[in-house]
Amino acid sequence: MTENTTLNFINGQYTDPIKGQWIENVSPVSGEVIGKIAQSTMEDIDAACQSAKKVVDRWANMPIEKRAEILHRIADLIDENSQQLVKLESEDCGKPITRARTIEIPRAASNFRFFAAAITQFASETHESVGWNAINLTLRSPLGIVACISPWNLPLYLFTWKIAPALATGNCVIAKPSELTPRTASFVGELCNQAGLPKGVLNIIQGTGDSAGQAILEHPEIKAVSFTGGTATGKKVAATVAPQFKKLSLELGGKNPNIIFADCDYDKALAITVYSSFGNQGQICLCGSRILIEESIYERFRKDLIAKTRSLKIGNPSDDETEIGTLISKSHFEKVLAYLKLADEEGATLLCGGKPAVVEGSEQGCFIEPTIYEIENHQSRICQEEIFGPVVTLHSFRTEEEALQLANGTPYGLSATLWTTDLDRTMRMTRQIESGVIWVNSWLMRDLRTPFGGMKASGVGREGGFDSLRFFTQSKNVCISYRAK
């Protein structure tokens, strides 16, 4: 891999796409073509799978301690090369470089360290069947060759979140990062070679979803698919994978409520609401895009939220002072602009933002001002559909019951944030909110041991901790009968 050409990584080597097809890598900051990316086809996927087949037994049978040692070395190498990874991540995504430096690249190393440690504690189970003179052993083994398909919004962060547990459990991996953000994932291939990962254990395939992605889903050697992306794409993934009876994990979209009661820690709730609304330009599936505020503090909170939002610095992602960078691509930029137009058509009241931003020196960049709407009809499309940009809606509520109804009133159920100092209310609400992850008086505090995933249209399955290790293994029950004295 060079900075300008992103190749496939197969059998420990960077290779051109077999059919010689390429796609452009376009900067979301300048709008210019900054390189080319391999456009993979079934032939490339088959080459990767054949490479994995040669080493799948060796890797699966390697002592756990040795596998963990290699993963720890990969984590160390991510740290050692963090400066280059930060630069590539910010350029590919258009995200503020400080975010890549302080959150996302360090988390990529943490993912490897966590699962390197977790696999050493992942034990088989035994159940003594008293009275039957038998003992049941639940054994777990790797699946073989698995696929990990990761999104563009947190590229290396989520790429490593998938491949680390898959590798830790002894699987060989066919991994595909988004074609919009391919370079940090590609760089990991070289780090794996340096760490001593056997060639063929990790193969990194580049290309679009309809070509490389679809071929991965269809390949008969792949036994499981872990996918993170939009709900519409998730439906297509499921439609392809389910009839093949492969294991499937889907982490999909969200339309997450941020529920703010009058008894909250006001200053903390306000500050974190700004962060949870517009962090990474709103391009995080966990962003709080529906802000529900108790009526008695609604006017005050709205005023203060607008003021803080307007103070956010929009700028070139490479500037350390920048808080709001670009959206990921021109097509996504146009999609978000279409939602802004729709909001006007639906009668929403624009409180701030609502238009593209112009950044000096990056006039062709995909910048949109952080935007807040006030809207009465919660069934409107901008309240029901995932925009995945710096756009939030405000709603007031009077009672706990009304807040709960609004919170659960979309097809999604990924995450929710609850702001209250009332413990009884906390227990009542968290039991009834239809979300896979609920933060109380906080946001995005992720203990890697805990399960992560959504309800309803937000996905199927859970990732994190032992849940990830269980997904990438298959269980076998062995019942041994013995003669008692």
Image (spheres, grey):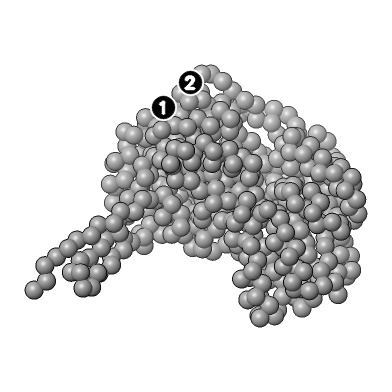
Q: Amino acid at mark 1?
A: Ala
Q: Are marks 2 and 1 in contact (CB under 8 Å)?
A: yes
Residue 192 visible somewhere in the drawing: no
**Which residue occupies the extreme front position in the image?**
132
Viewer-nearest residue: 210 or 303: 210
Along the line of sight, the residue nearer the viewer: 88 or 57: 57
In the rendered structure, the answer to whether residue 417 lies left or right of residue 71 reads: right
The quarter of the rendered structure image containing the C terminus is: bottom left
Estimate how packed mark 1 is, as few (under 14), some (14 to 19) or many (20 or more) residues with alpha carbons within 10 Å: some
Q: Which residue of the protein is positioned furthest toward the left in this rendering?
A: 485
Q: Which residue is at 58% across, 51% downward?
A: 459
Residue corresponding to mark 1: 47
Determine the secondary structure under disc 2: loop
Answer left or right for 340 relative to 5.
Answer: right
Q: CA distance from mark 2 to mark 1?
A: 9 Å
Which numbered dot is residue 277? none
Q: Identify which residue, 128 or 306, lies in the foreground.
A: 128
Residue 75, image x, y percentages: 47, 51
Residue 294 is situated, as x and y percent measured from the top left of the image, at 81, 71
Q: Residues within 10 Å of mark 2 (few under 14, many from 20)?
A: some
Residue 358 at x, y percent in the picture: 85, 41
* Front residue of 473 and 237: 237
Residue 271 lies in quadrant: bottom right
User: Which residue corresponds to the image point at 38% horizontal and 57% vertical from the top-left?
Assistant: 119
Q: Amino acid at mark 2?
A: Ile
Question: Which residue corresponds to mark 2?
Answer: 18
**Image vertical order of residue 117 relative to residue 8, above or below:** below
Residue at x 74% of width, y 34% of height: 331
Q: Label 1: state its secondary structure.
A: helix
